[in-house]
C-alpha cells in the first residue's frame, strides 16, 4: 500500500479488500468489551480541516482515539489561517509537532496532493475531501456498507449494481466511489440532470443516465447525493421542485426499488430536496450505518498507513 491516501485510484484491488477486511476485524474488536486498542499509542494524528465537516472529522477523531493515538484538531477558523498563513507554513508547524498522519480537508481540489508531494510533512497524508475532486475514505466506508448488505460469499462487489444520483458535478464522493467501485468490480450508473454531470464524465468507468425511474428497478445500492448549494454560483436547475420531481428520492420512487435494495447518502442531507424524510428514515435506509461504519473504516486506514501492531497481537 502507498504511504498516502489521496485518491481512490491509489488503491489496488488487493489494497481495497485489505482495508475492508481489516475494518471488519477492527469493528469486531471494538464491539467487544475493550473499546480501545493500544496499537497507535505514542503516534500523533492531526485533523487539518479548512472546510466544514461533521461526520468525517468526528469519525477520524474517534478512529484515531480508539487506536490510542494522540489527536490534534486544527480548524482553519480560529487559527492563524485567518491571519493569512499559507498551507506551507501550517504544514511546517504540524511537522515540527511530529505529526505521523495529517488528515486534510480543503476547498481547493489538489490540496492533499500538494501537501503529500511537497515534502513538508514526513508522515502520511490522508485526503478527507479536496474541493470537488476526491474523498477516498468516504468511498471506502460506502463500499464497506454495501459489502455488509450485498456481497456474495467471496467478499467483493463484483457485478453489484450501484446507482449514484444527483449533484455529481460538485461531488467528490461520486468521483471516489466510481473509481473504487470500478476497482471492486461493481457496475455503477450515474444519474443527474445534464447540467450537473461533470465535463468528460463519458471517460469515467461507469454508465450515464438521465432517467432515474428507468434505473431504479434494477438498482441494488442507491446513493443519493446532496445538492451542494454552496458550490453553485449560478442556476443549475429551474427550481427545487423541478429538481425533486426529476431526481429526488420520494416515497413513491423508494417503493419502486427491489425489497433487498439499500438507500445511502453521505450526509449532510437536504431532506425534502434530494431525499424525502420517509426514504431517509425508511427500512431500506442504511444512512446511519454508513456513519458508524465510517469509524471502523477510518481505523483500518490509520492502522494500515501507520503500520500498527498486527491485529492478532492486538486482540491478545
Ligand atoms: C460529503 C463531503 O463533504 O464531500 N460529506 C461527507 O463527507 N460526509 C458530501 C457532501 O458534503 O455533500
Image (tube, helix red, strand yellow):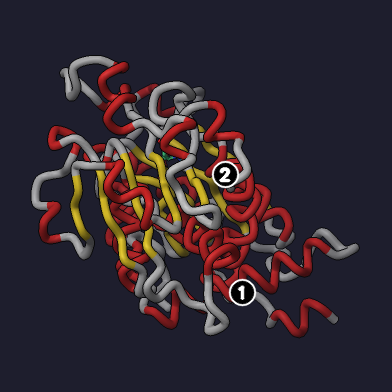
The residue lying toward the viewer, choosing from 53 and 123, is: 53
Q: What is the spatial separation of the Cα atoms under label 2 and label 1, in whole angstroms?
A: 25 Å
Residue at left 28%, top 61%? 117
Sequence-first tag of 2 and 1: 1
Question: Which residue does the numbered mark 2 point to in the structure image?
Answer: 285
Q: The C terminus appears in which quarter of the rendering? A: bottom right
The residue lying toward the viewer, choosing from 37 and 18, is: 18
Q: How crowded is mark 1: few (under 14 residues within 10 Å), some or many (20 or more)?
A: many
Residue 149: x %, y % from top left = 58, 63
Left or right for 79, reference 238: right
Residue 74: x %, y % from top left = 53, 37
Residue at left 72%, top 70%? 39
Classify 60 as above or below 67: above
Quadrant position of ligand 1: top left
Left or right for 179, reference 308: left
Mark 1 residue element: helix
Where residue 57 sits, quadrant-wise, is top right
Mark 2 residue element: loop
Tell me the tag on residue 22: 1
Residue at left 75%, top 68%? 28
Left or right for 227, reference 28: left
Amino acid at each position: 500500500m502507498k504511504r498516502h491516501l489521496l485518491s481512490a485510484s491509489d488503491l489496488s484491488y488487493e489494497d481495497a479488500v485489505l482495508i475492508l477486511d481489516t475494518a471488519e476485524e477492527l469493528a469486531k474488536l471494538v464491539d467487544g468489551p475493550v473499546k480501545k486498542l493500544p496499537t497507535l499509542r505514542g503516534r500523533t494524528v492531526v485533523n487539518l480541516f479548512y472546510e466544514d465537516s461533521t461526520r468525517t472529522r468526528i469519525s477520524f477523531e474517534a478512529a484515531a482515539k480508539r487506536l490510542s493515538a494522540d489527536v490534534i484538531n486544527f480548524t482553519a477558523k480560529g487559527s492563524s489561517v485567518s491571519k493569512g498563513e499559507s498551507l506551507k507554513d501550517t504544514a511546517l508547524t504540524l511537522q515540527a509537532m511530529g505529526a505521523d498522519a495529517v488528515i486534510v480537508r480543503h476547498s481547493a481540489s489538489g490540496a492533499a496532493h500538494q501537501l503529500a508531494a511537497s515534502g513538508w510533512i514526513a508522515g502520511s497524508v490522508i485526503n478527507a475531501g479536496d474541493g470537488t475532486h476526491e474523498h477516498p475514505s468516504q468511498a471506502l466506508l460506502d463500499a464497506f456498507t454495501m459489502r455488509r448488505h450485498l456481497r456474495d460469499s467471496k467478499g467483493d462487489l463484483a457485478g453489484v449494481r450501484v446507482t449514484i444520483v444527483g449533484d455529481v458535478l460538485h461531488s467528490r464522493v461520486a468521483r471516489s466511489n466510481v473509481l473504487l467501485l470500478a476497482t471492486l468490480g461493481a457496475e455503477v450508473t450515474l444519474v443527474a440532470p445534464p447540467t450537473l454531470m461533470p465535463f468528460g464524465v463519458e471517460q469515467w468507468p461507469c454508465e450515464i443516465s438521465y432517467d432515474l425511474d428507468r434505473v431504479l428497478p434494477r438498482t441494488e445500492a442507491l446513493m443519493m447525493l446532496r445538492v451542494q448549494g454552496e458550490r453553485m454560483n449560478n442556476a443549475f436547475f429551474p427550481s427545487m421542485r423541478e429538481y425533486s420531481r426529476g431526481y429526488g428520492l420520494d416515497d413513491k420512487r423508494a417503493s419502486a426499488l427491489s425489497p433487498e435494495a439499500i438507500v445511502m447518502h453521505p450526509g449532510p442531507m437536504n431532506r425534502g430536496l434530494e431525499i424525502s424524510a420517509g426514504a431517509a428514515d425508511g427500512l431500506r435506509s442504511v444512512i446511519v450505518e454508513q456513519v458508524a461504519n465510517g469509524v471502523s473504516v477510518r481505523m483500518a486506514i490509520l492502522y494500515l498507513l501507520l503500520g500498527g501492531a498486527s491485529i492478532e497481537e492486538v486482540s491478545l
